[in-house]
Amino acid sequence: MSAGDANARFANVVLPHLDDAYALARWLTRNRADAEDVVQDACLHAFRGIAGFADGNARAWVLTIVRHTAYAWLRKNHPAALIVVEDLEAVERQQASSSALDADTPETALIAKGDAKRLEAAIAALPPLFRETLVLRDLQGLAYREIAEVTQVPIGTVMSRLARARRRLSETGGLAAA
């Protein structure tokens, strides 16, 4: 594959998924700068392996690389650290946009912000594998099959982890009863 072909293929396969890559890295590293480092390393890995991409699910392929890169980066740079999340920017943005439509009063906006903080804390308290599955499904919107591909576990395991994560969030008050 020529350099021009590799560049074009990288632009078509990887670049459209950089926002999702950063969001996942941010959830796993709990730090903006660390997430940027992880995504940069993941992009290098993706570029080196772009010739081997078999025209499957590009998003799942990119997020798999980001996931592996993030865990390797965390083992190297934070070997004893518990992997938790720093914040829930995506949820806050979504709530802010829906709150802008619904917020009749400053009190309503304040309550919505408090709800986002409680959800953030509840997700941060989840074990890493549950948190990862929840983020990939509920924030990234991946299908069960895509999550199974990214995390390299059976679909049944994905479903079990997601159910347990949601149950724990419900028990801690992080989610309203569904």
Image (cartoon, rainbow, N blue to C red):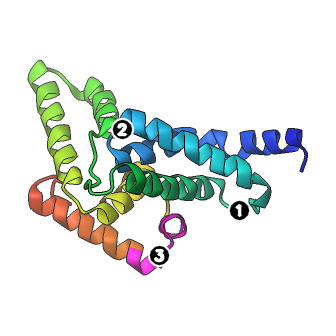
The residue singled out by tag 1 in the image is: 56
Asked if residue 151 lies in the magenta stretch, the reply is yes
- Residue at figure coordinates x 33%, y 56% from the top left: 79
Horizontally, residue 101 falls left or right of residue 60, namely left
Amino acid, disc 2: Ala
Amino acid, disc 3: Val
Residue farthest to the right, as pictured? 2
Q: Is residue 10 visible?
A: yes
Amino acid, disc 1: Gly
Asked if residue 96 lies in the magenta stretch, the reply is no
**Mark 2 surroundings within 10 Å by alpha-carbon count, few (fewer than 14), some (14 through 19), many (20 or more):** few
User: Which percent across, then down, holds residue 10?
Assistant: 74, 43
Horizontally, residue 71 falls left or right of residue 146, namely left
The residue singled out by tag 3 in the image is: 153
**Residue 152 drawn above or below residue 57:** below
* 109 or 118: nearer the viewer: 118
**Mark 3 surroundings within 10 Å by alpha-carbon count, few (fewer than 14), some (14 through 19), many (20 or more):** few
Magenta residues, start to end = 144-157
Q: Nearer the viewer, mark 3 or mark 2?
A: 3
User: Which percent across, then down, holds residue 156?
Assistant: 41, 80
Mark 3 or mark 1, which is nearer the start of the sequence? 1
Horizontally, residue 65 falls left or right of residue 161, namely right
* Numbered label attached to residue 90: 2
Q: CA distance from mark 3 to mark 2?
A: 26 Å
User: Which percent across, then down, holds residue 53?
Assistant: 74, 59
Q: Nearer the viewer, mark 1 or mark 3?
A: 3
Q: CA distance from mark 1 to mark 3?
A: 18 Å
